[in-house]
Amino acid sequence: MAETRKTKVLIIGSGPAGYTAGVYASRAMLEPILVQGIEPGGQLTTTTEVENWPGDSHVQGPDLMVRMEAHARAMGCEIIGDIISSVDFSKRPFVCQSDSGTVYEADAIILATGARAKWLGLPSEEAFKGFGVSACATCDGFFYRGMEIVVVGGGNTAVEEALFLTNFASKVTLVHRRDELRSEKILEDRLMKNPKIETLWFHEIEEVYGTDNPKGVEGVKVKHTKTGEITDLPCKGVFIAIGHAPANELVKDTLETHMGGYVVTKPDSTETSIPGVYAAGDLTDHKYRQAVTSAGMGCMAALEAERWLAEQE
Ligand code: FAD
Ligand code: NAP
């Protein structure tokens, strides 16, 4: 028979927002349960150096997330390796089903499911995913030692991935659809100064091509965004770094979303349209999308849940 776990506060997600909510809810003696999801530690586990987390001028993303998890645990948060598969906000306590079969019943819920990498949506990209096409340089860069690599995108992620990949690749070409980056200036400077990186402005990927046996990428066809001219760019790896979309699958039919799926919260608050349900971090933030802002929202959500639960009593 499926086990049922009851809690005052269920936190869904284990990125900076979830773990910070765990710290605050534990210190409020709410004995929260945090369900980690498929990516324990969240997006920062897919990067290397983090240089803008206050108090650490240099920290490795995965190390920072291990420390956050330990901090939440030390405060008394119960952390469970499970994935929430559905939520029912129509009655209280709220009921969440999970992949393990455990049912979680909670008086209040903090949604902190973050965001996931976007893909271009090309059939050829899909065909070579895991065989030369990747969205995580930290995970897969190692396989491309001495090879040529293409990175697609013009934001912080694309620039960081391009820089990181120069540790392995003989050459990295950054393909961007405009001639202006939206990354931080410090990163842009590093990119421009790196002799292994070339930029290809005003281009988009038209097709990824390669061999079937063994399966692998041999290059990309790129299209000039103004002239339409198609050129060939041989490479063994293609890293897609075109941004992230909110991981809203659990709630997109029950909570209001905007700006491409971000959960709407009340102004200066993490309250959603359902009393007792809070949303924090990249799931709700279309503007800043930083670790520190996510952590800040996790704190807000726990404080707001604490006050709301006290009012219910
Ligand atoms: P996330 O970190 O996205 O975590 C979401 C969590 O929700 C995950 O643990 C996942 O397993 C869980 N989850 C999802 N669905 C479910 C479910 N159904 N059930 C249970 N759990 C679920 N920001 C910075 O400030 N500095 C940086 O240097 C920096 N570098 C970055 C580098 C890269 C490559 C990327 C991709 C992002 C970077 N960011 C950086 C942005 C930063 O990582 C995010 O803003 C931050 O991680 C968002 O935190 P979050 O807690 O909202 O969600
Ligand atoms: P982003 O800032 O949204 O940038 C996405 C980039 O991909 C943009 O340059 C965009 O082009 C391009 N793009 C989007 N869709 C495309 C498509 N279909 N085809 C081709 N190009 C496409 O995303 P991000 O770089 O992943 O960053 C997400 C958030 O995480 C940001 O808030 C960022 O600051 C944060 N982050 C921070 C750090 C850090 O602090 N060091 C590191 C990584 C990420 P246009 O520019 O033309 O729109």
Image (cartoon, helix red, strand yellow):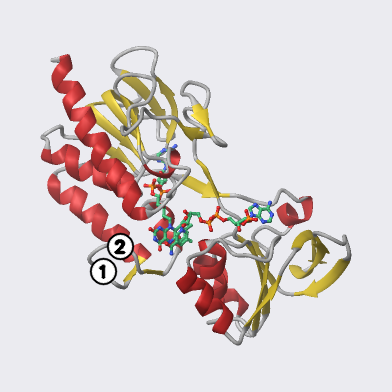
Q: Nearer the viewer, residue 62 or 298?
A: 298
Quarter of the N terminus within the rendering: top left
Side of 69 relative to 150 (left or right): left
The vertical placement of 88 against 168, above or below, is above
Side of 211 relative to 114 (left or right): right
Q: Is mark 2 within 8 Å of ligand 1?
A: yes
Residue annotated with mark 1: 56
Q: Position of residue 161 (x, y in %)?
A: 54, 69
**Disc 1 packing (10 Å; few <14; some 14–19; many ≥20):** few
* Label 1 residue SS: loop
Residue type, mark 2 in image: Trp
The vertical placement of 57 against 300, above or below, is below
Q: Residue at left 89%, top 64%?
A: 229
- Total marks drawn? 2
Q: Is residue 283 visible?
A: yes
Q: Position of residue 166 (x, y in %)?
A: 56, 80
Q: Residue at left 35%, top 12%?
A: 91
> Are dots 1 and 2 in contact, CB under 8 Å?
yes
**In the displayed image of the protein, which residue is found farthest to the top?**
91
Q: Position of residue 262 (x, y in %)?
A: 49, 36
The vertical placement of 221 against 97, above or below, is below
User: Residue 280 is drawn in which quadrant?
Assistant: top left
Q: Nearer the viewer, residue 170 or 33?
A: 170
Quote the CA–CA distance across marks 1 and 2. 6 Å
Residue annotated with mark 2: 53
Q: Residue at left 68%, top 66%?
A: 179
